[in-house]
Structure formats: C-alpha cells, structure tokens
Image (cartoon, rainbow, N blue to C red):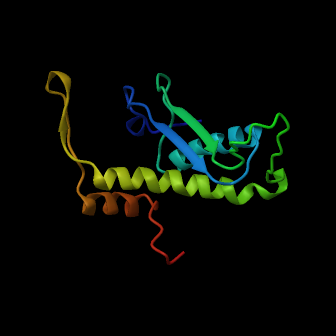
C-alpha cells in the first residue's frame, strides 16, 4: 500500500467524542453496533483515528424507560433485520455534526497562547466541494 506522505498528519490531530441519542427501542448490543457506525461518519470527512487519538463513541436510547416499580419488566426493541436505516442515519448525523461544528467554530486561544483559528463558512464549502464531500442535492 502506498500513501501520499503529505496527506498523513505528522502528529496527533486530537480526539473526538460522539454521543448518539435515539428514541428507537434498541437493546444494549444494538446500541453498541450503532456506536461502531460513528467512525464511518468521521471517515467520510477524512478522519483516520490516529494512533494516540482518544476517540469515544457512546450510544443510548430513551425508549423503554419506565418508572414502574414492578420487578417484571417488558421491553420492546427493533429486530436486527430492521436496524440498517439507523446505521445510515448515524453515519449521516455524525458527518453533519462535524460539518456544523466547523461552520459554527470561532477562533480560540487556549493555554500557553495556543491559537486555533476558525474556518470561514465559504472556505468550509470550498474544501468540501474540492474533496467531493458536499451533497448539494444533485446526487
């Protein structure tokens, strides 16, 4: 496998925390599968999950929450065969959340004067178009 050395960051580029919340009735193993799809949304925008990255992905459902004090619980859940649309939605939501955070970002100065400059909305659009990452509704 050959790589373009200039496209691979020479240092850690940070971490990302993604929390997926749904009202779909899912079991714990299904939520784990949903959380695993987060990396696909990140990858669509060029994220590579670098070696020292501390990425964290969590998923939870608000379905089946009950205040009943009965010792017998009843849970409704989607069958595994019906979960694919949620996988697709998770990937799309993560991708959109990252783009939204880029557009809404403001320049900040952190500890020791470390500065992170915001990217203009127009520049974000240009970059997304350049790398064919912008779905403008024509596809």
Q: Position of residue 95 (x, y in %)?
A: 49, 53
Instruction: Give above or below for 110 relative to 124.
Output: above
Name the residue nearer the viewer: 81 or 65.
65
Q: Is residue 56 left or right of residue 35?
A: left
Q: Nearer the viewer, residue 118 or 30?
A: 30
105 left or right of 69 in image: left
Query: Which residue is the extreme one toward the bottom?
Result: 138
On screen, 110 above or below 34? above
Residue sitting at 54 percent across and 75 percent down?
A: 139
**Looking at the image, how many numbered discs can be counted on the residues?**
0
Q: Residue furthest front?
A: 69
Q: Position of residue 81 (x, y in %)?
A: 84, 55
Q: Where is residue 107 drawn, in percent x and y?
A: 19, 43
Q: Residue at x 37, y 25 (%)?
A: 11
Q: Based on the displayed image, in which of its 4 quarters is residue 59 positioned?
A: top right
Horizontal and vertical percent position of residue 135: 48, 68
Q: Residue at the location (48% across, 41% down)?
A: 47
Q: Quadrant of the N terminus?
A: top right
């Amino acid at each position: 496998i050959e790589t373009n050395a200039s496209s691979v960051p020479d240092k850690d580029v940070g971490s990302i925390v993604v929390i997926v919340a749904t009202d779909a009735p899912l079991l714990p193993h299904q939520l784990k599968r949903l959380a695993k799809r987060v990396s696909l949304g990140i990858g669509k925008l060029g994220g590579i999950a670098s070696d020292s990255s501390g990425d964290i992905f969590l998923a939870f459902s608000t379905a089946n929450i009950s205040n009943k004090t009965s010792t017998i619980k009843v849970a409704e859940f989607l069958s595994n065969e019906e979960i694919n649309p949620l996988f697709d939605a998770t990937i799309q939501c993560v991708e959109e959340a990252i783009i939204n955070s880029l557009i809404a970002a403001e320049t900040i100065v952190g500890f020791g004067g470390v500065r992170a400059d915001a990217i203009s909305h127009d520049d974000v659009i240009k970059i997304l178009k350049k790398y064919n990452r912008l779905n403008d509704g024509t596809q």
